[in-house]
Image: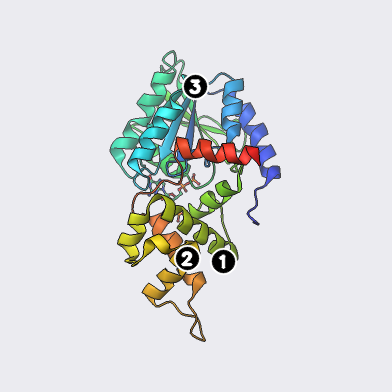
């Protein structure tokens, strides 16, 4: 399995995040609601606990995730009293509108002009941080005037007189704990994958869907005997259903893999979560035993 992550970037990000976190009141951690544990970077937890900062954990993209799994994750995360978990989608302005109030509730001693609430948005790539930031900025009532940049990469942006976001690239690579995390992240587009790996990712995704959501596969592709299929059969079956062939007449596994991933990522297959707190705990237990 050749999915890579980059410790070099990670170390630089860690150092920067540790410095920046000293001056924030609330850490807003954005994760992907379809895979809330695999899309966490444990570093956020480590640093914010070290600095005793509360966390607004945003499970974003709930429009794509299984609502029951999302509800279970919210309960799971809120077992930690320093965390408020908020399931939302940046696609709904009403959801975005609640973010600041939720963050404010975590630091009630801040939020006046002399002591504005300072927030920092963190998370791995592609979970929706920029979209959230842009949506929050659009709602900005009045531009109070951005402070001079403290460093070239850090700037405080005021949403109103009482509320500021430390603008940081916030870039953290996922810590790929288990091989299945790499596959889930690649399937969900948080990390890139070349065509060869895409076939492996799609086959893995097909297996997961057969286990978790066979009815959605059935509904989308109309397979006749889904109970007898494995991941490879699903991808091949999709190629057959769609008439994807390579020259010479064989089924085009690469194109079908791409299509399955697209259908999952766009939500065309339905609302899917690749882990629940229970399946996560079970997978971790097996992984740690090995
Ligand atoms: P980042 O800063 O954390 O890296 O993420 P960014 O905001 O760039 O968002 C990544 C992708 O996720 C974007 O799609 C964005 O439109 C999408 N996105 C953000 N929030 C939501 C949400 O609540 N629901 C859904 N369905 N999508 C959301 P993109 O540019 O098309 O990328 P991709 O999806 O093709 O990877």
Q: CA distance from mark 3 to mark 1?
A: 41 Å
Q: Position of residue 201 (x, y in %)?
A: 53, 58
Q: Along the polypeptide, which appears first: circle 3 or circle 1? A: 3
Q: Is residue 20 left or right of residue 274?
A: right
| Residue topped by disc 1 | 195
Q: Is mark 3 within 8 Å of ligand 1?
A: no
Q: Label 3: which residue?
A: 54
**Label 1 near label 3: C-beta < 8 Å?**
no
> Which quadrant holds the N terminus?
bottom right
Which of the 4 image quarters holds residue 106?
Answer: top left
Residue 191 is situated, as x and y percent measured from the top left of the image, at 56, 52
User: Where on the picture, by quarter, is residue 151?
Assistant: top right
Picture coordinates of residue 194, whole percent (x, y): 58, 63
Residue 56 in view, yes or no? yes
Find disc 2 in the rendering and name its residue. Answer: 258
Dot 3 alpha-carbon crowd within 10 angstroms: few under 14, some 14 to 19, many 20 or more: many
- Give the residue drawn at x 38%, y 39%: 69
For disc 2, the neighbor class at 10 Å (few under 14, some 14 to 19, many from 20) is some
Task: Examine the rendering and report whether any part of residue 268 can be seen.
Answer: no
Q: Is residue 289 found left or right of 80 in the rendered image? A: right
Residue 257 vertical position relative to residue 250 in the rendered view, above or below: above
Q: Verify CB contact (< 8 Å) between mark 1 and mark 2.
A: yes
Q: Is mark 1 within 8 Å of ligand 1?
A: no
Is ligand 1 less than 8 Å from the beta carbon at label 2? no
Q: CA distance from mark 2 to mark 3?
A: 40 Å
Report x, y in % for residue 97. 32, 33
| Disc 3 secondary structure class | loop
């Amino acid at each position: 399995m050749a999915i890579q992550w980059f410790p070099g970037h990670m170390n630089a990000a860690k150092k920067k995040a540790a410095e920046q976190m000293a001056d924030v009141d609330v850490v807003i951690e954005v994760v992907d609601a379809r895979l809330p544990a695999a899309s966490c970077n444990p570093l956020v937890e480590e640093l914010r606990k070290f600095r005793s900062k509360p966390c607004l954990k945003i499970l974003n993209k709930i429009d794509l995730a299984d609502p029951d799994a999302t509800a279970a994750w919210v309960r799971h995360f809120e077992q930690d009293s320093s965390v408020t978990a908020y399931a939302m989608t940046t696609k709904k302005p009403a959801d975005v509108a609640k973010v600041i109030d939720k963050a404010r509730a975590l630091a009630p001693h801040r939020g006046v002009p002399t002591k504005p609430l300072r927030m920092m948005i963190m998370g791995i790539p592609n979970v929706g941080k920029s979209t959230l930031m842009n949506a929050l900025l659009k709602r900005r009532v009045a531009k109070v005037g951005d402070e001079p940049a403290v460093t070239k990469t850090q700037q405080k942006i005021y949403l109103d007189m009482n509320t500021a976001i430390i603008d940081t690239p916030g870039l953290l690579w996922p810590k790929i704990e288990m091989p299945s995390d790499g596959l889930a992240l690649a399937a969900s587009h948080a990390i890139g994958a070349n065509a060869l790996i895409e076939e492996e990712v799609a086959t893995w995704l097909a297996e997961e869907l057969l286990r978790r959501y066979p009815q959605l596969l059935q509904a989308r592709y109309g397979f006749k005997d889904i109970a007898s299929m494995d991941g490879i059969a699903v991808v091949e079956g999709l190629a057959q259903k769609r008439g994807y062939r390579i020259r010479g007449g064989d089924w085009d596994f690469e194109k079908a893999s791409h299509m399955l991933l697209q259908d999952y990522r766009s939500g065309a297959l339905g609302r899917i979560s690749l882990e629940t707190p229970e399946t996560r705990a079970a997978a971790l237990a097996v992984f740690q035993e090995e």
